[in-house]
Image: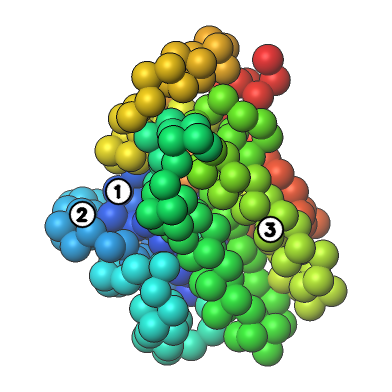
Amino acid sequence: MDRRRHAGKTAIVTGAGAGIGRATVRQLAAEGAKVVGCDVNERALAEASEALEREDLTATLVAADVTKQADVERLVADVGGPVHVLANVAGIMDHFVPLAELDDELWERVLGVNLTGVMRLTRAVLPGMIEGGGGAIVTVASKASLGAGASGTAYTTSKHGVIGLVKSVAYYYGPSAIRSNAVLPGGVATAIGATSAPRSQWAFERAQLSMATMAPAAEPDRIAEVISWLASEEASFVNGAVVTADGGWSAA
């Protein structure tokens, strides 16, 4: 951890209440950034704030839903200045539901959080980054971005879409000194487990074939470290990259 790595930078982190999002808030704050974190879970935000205080770290944590355009606009406006770093971390799973059993409500909810929310917040910070001369956007994708079997249809589709979004932003805005990269975790010890409880037993059993080579679940801090590095000047020539952080799961 470099206490000056992000000195003078302002960062937005979504999914800040728990898991990778909370760890990323902690990492960036400890490395000198002014951090604004958001989450839909206000209780989790309060717990995250208390955890930061115990380490003598500070961050502004606010309730916001990345699926709502008004919340996204308010979040960016409340920063009160340029955003140098955006960490798109918020995400949910889909209970391992395969397509024939997938209803519109679950599809729209998963795509709304995992893909549309990423699009909306990235879109919201781009004008300021362009005007300010650059920035770094790091989006949490998944091992499920590379193939099927790690989740159900909606989650897999959303995380494949995230890679396209990340690469498109890198292609179009790289000349404006804006870098867009993706981190692909495997299993991580996070609260996402609430939406991973299987609803389709046969589909979950089928998914076990993919999970046979899965490494032990990582602690969220391990993923936050990768996010911090990709957002830093040390990664200044890394743009449009898909960085796996899954303990080797995708190599099998």
The residue at which mark 2 appears reads as 44
Q: Nearer the viewer, residue 111 or 131?
A: 111
Asked whether residue 60 is in view, the answer is yes
Closer to the chain start, of discs 3 and 1, is 1
Nearer the viewer's eye, disc 2 or disc 3? 3
Name the residue at 28% across, 38% down.
194
Name the residue at 60% across, 21% down.
249
Asked whether residue 234 is in view, the answer is no
- Tell me where residue 199 appears, x and y as whole percent: 33, 29
Q: Nearer the viewer, residue 231 or 188?
A: 188
Q: CA distance from mark 2 to mark 3?
A: 28 Å
The residue at which mark 3 appears reads as 166
The kind of secondary structure element at disc 3 is: helix
**Amino acid residing under circle 2:** Ala
Name the residue at 27% across, 71% down.
62
- Tell me where residue 11 appears, x and y as whole percent: 48, 69
Q: Which mark is residue 18?
A: 1
- Tell me where residue 144 appears, x and y as whole percent: 59, 35
The kind of secondary structure element at disc 2 is: helix
The kind of secondary structure element at disc 1 is: loop
Neighbourhood count class around disc 2 (C-alpha, 10 Å): few under 14, some 14–19, many 20 upward: some
Q: Are marks 3 and 1 in contact (CB under 8 Å)?
A: no
Neighbourhood count class around disc 1 (C-alpha, 10 Å): few under 14, some 14–19, many 20 upward: many
**Amino acid residing under circle 3:** Val
Q: Quadrant for residue 134, please give it.
A: bottom right
Q: Is 122 placed above or below 114 here?
A: below
Q: CA distance from mark 2 to mark 1?
A: 6 Å
- Tell me where residue 53 appears, x and y as whole percent: 19, 58
**Amino acid residing under circle 1:** Ala
Closer to the chain start, of discs 2 and 1, is 1
Q: Nearer the viewer, residue 54 or 43?
A: 43
